[in-house]
C-alpha cells in the first residue's frame, strides 16, 4: 500500500510538472510574440518617418530646381541692360537650356538607376547648383548660354530622381499623394522666385543672386548626405520586372501622355521664361504712355 501511494505521488508530481512547463512555455511564447509585434510596430514607425523625410527632400529639391530655372527670366531686364541682350539672343539662351534638358531627360534616368537614389540625386543637384553659381561669372550672352546648357544637363535629373524615390519608399496606394506633393514644389518655386530674386538683385546685385540660389542646392546636398538612408526594397517594387523598351514604346498610354505634354509644356515654359520680361516691357509702356510711345516700340527698344 505504501509503495502504491508513493508511485501515485510521483505520477501526480510529474503531471503537475508537465502542466507547469506547458503553462510557463505558453507564457514565454506569448511574451516573445508580443515582443515581435512591438519590434514590428517600431520598425513600421521608423519606415514611415523615413519615407516622408525622403519625400520632403524631393519636394525641397524641386523648389530649388525652379528657383535656379527662373533666375534668367526674372533678371532678364537687368541682364539685357548689362549685356545688351536682344530678344533673339535671349531666346538662344533659353534654347540652350531646353536642348540640354530634353536630351538628358532619358539619360539621367538610366544614370540614376545605375548609381542609386542617394548618389545619383546628390550628383544631380550638385551639378546644377555648381552650374547656377557659374552664371555669376558670365561676361555676355554666350557665357550665359553655356552655363544655361550645363544647368539643363543637371536639372533634367530632378524628376526622374524624385519619381524613383517615390517608387522606392511608397506603396502603390500612396504614390498618387506622394507624387502630388513632390510636383507641387515646382509651383511653389515658381511663386517664390520673382519676389526672392528681385529682392536679392536690388539688395546685392545680379551676380550675388546666382550665387545665393546655387548655394541653396549645396545646403540641400549637405542635409541629404547626412540624413538620408537607402530604403529596404518595397515588396511590390522588388517583384516587378523591367518593361522592355519595345513594349514601352508600343504603349498607348505613353504616347497619350507624351502628346499631352507636347501641348501643355510650351504654355508653362512660355510663362516661366517669357512672362517676366514681357511684363517689364508692359510696365515701361505704361510709364511712357503719356509720351505717346507704343507698346511695340517699347518692347523693341528694350529686347530687339
Image: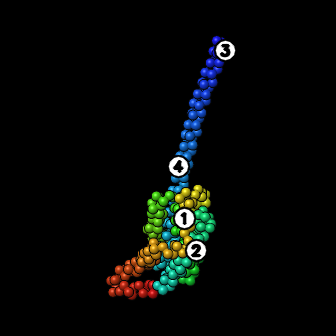
Give the number of marks. 4
Of labels 1 and 2, earlier in sequence is: 2
CA gap between label 4 and label 2 equals 36 Å
**Image location (x, y in percent) of residue 14:** 63, 24
Q: Name the residue under label 1.
A: 164
Q: Are marks 4 and 2 in contact (CB under 8 Å)?
A: no
Across and down, in percent, residue 167 comes to: 52, 62
Tell me if label 1 and label 2 are in contact, CB under 8 Å: no
Q: Which x, y percent locates residue 199?
A: 47, 69
Sequence order check, earlier mark of 4 and 3: 3
Label 4 or label 2, whichever comes before in sequence order:
4
Residue corresponding to mark 3 = 3
Please rate how many residues cluster around mark 1, counting C-alpha atoms within 10 Å: few if below 14, some from 14 to 19, many from 20: some
What residue did someone put label 4 on?
Answer: 45
Q: Which residue lies at the image location 45% right of the left edge and 60% below the top edge?
A: 177
Nearest-to-viewer mark from 3 and 1:
3
Q: Quadrant of residue 116?
A: bottom right
Up/down of 24 relative to 57, above or below: above
Q: How far apart are marks 3 and 2 (CA)?
A: 90 Å
* Chain-order first, disc 3 or disc 1: 3
Of labels 4 and 3, the one closer to you: 3
Location of residue 206 with respect to 216 vertically, above or below: below
Residue that numbered label 2 is attached to: 107
154 left or right, relative to 274: right
Note whether residue 15 is visible: yes
Residue 135 appears in which quarter of the rendering?
bottom right
Q: Which secondary structure, mark 3?
A: helix
Amino acid at each position: 500500500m505504501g509503495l502504491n501511494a508513493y508511485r501515485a505521488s510521483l505520477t501526480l508530481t510529474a503531471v503537475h510538472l508537465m502542466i507547469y512547463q506547458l503553462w510557463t512555455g505558453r507564457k514565454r511564447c506569448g511574451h516573445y510574440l508580443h515582443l515581435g509585434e512591438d519590434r514590428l510596430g517600431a520598425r513600421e514607425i521608423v519606415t514611415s518617418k523615413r519615407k516622408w523625410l525622403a519625400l520632403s527632400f524631393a519636394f525641397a529639391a524641386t523648389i530649388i530646381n525652379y528657383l535656379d530655372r527662373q533666375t534668367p527670366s526674372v533678371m532678364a531686364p537687368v541682364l539685357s541692360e548689362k549685356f545688351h541682350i536682344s530678344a533673339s539672343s535671349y531666346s538662344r539662351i533659353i534654347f540652350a537650356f531646353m536642348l540640354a534638358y530634353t536630351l538628358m531627360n532619358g539619360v539621367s534616368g538610366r544614370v540614376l538607376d545605375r548609381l542609386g537614389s542617394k548618389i545619383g540625386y546628390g550628383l544631380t543637384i550638385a551639378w546644377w547648383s555648381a552650374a547656377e553659381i557659374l552664371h555669376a561669372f558670365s561676361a555676355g550672352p554666350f557665357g550665359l548660354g553655356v552655363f544655361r546648357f550645363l544647368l539643363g544637363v543637371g536639372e533634367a535629373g530632378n524628376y526622374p530622381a524624385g519619381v524613383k524615390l517615390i517608387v522606392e519608399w511608397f506603396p502603390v496606394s500612396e504614390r498618387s499623394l506622394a507624387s502630388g506633393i513632390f510636383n507641387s514644389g515646382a509651383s511653389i518655386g515658381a511663386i517664390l522666385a520673382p519676389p526672392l530674386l528681385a529682392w536679392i538683385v536690388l539688395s546685392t546685385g545680379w551676380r550675388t543672386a546666382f550665387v545665393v540660389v546655387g548655394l541653396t542646392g549645396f545646403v540641400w546636398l549637405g542635409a541629404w548626405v547626412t540624413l538620408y538612408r537607402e530604403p529596404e526594397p518595397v515588396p511590390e517594387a522588388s517583384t516587378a520586372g523591367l518593361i522592355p523598351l519595345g513594349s514601352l514604346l508600343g504603349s498607348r498610354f505613353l504616347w497619350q501622355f507624351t502628346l499631352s505634354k507636347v501641348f501643355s509644356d510650351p504654355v508653362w515654359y512660355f510663362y516661366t521664361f517669357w512672362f517676366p520680361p514681357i511684363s517689364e516691357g508692359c510696365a515701361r509702356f505704361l510709364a511712357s504712355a503719356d509720351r505717346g510711345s507704343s507698346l511695340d516700340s517699347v518692347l523693341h527698344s528694350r529686347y530687339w
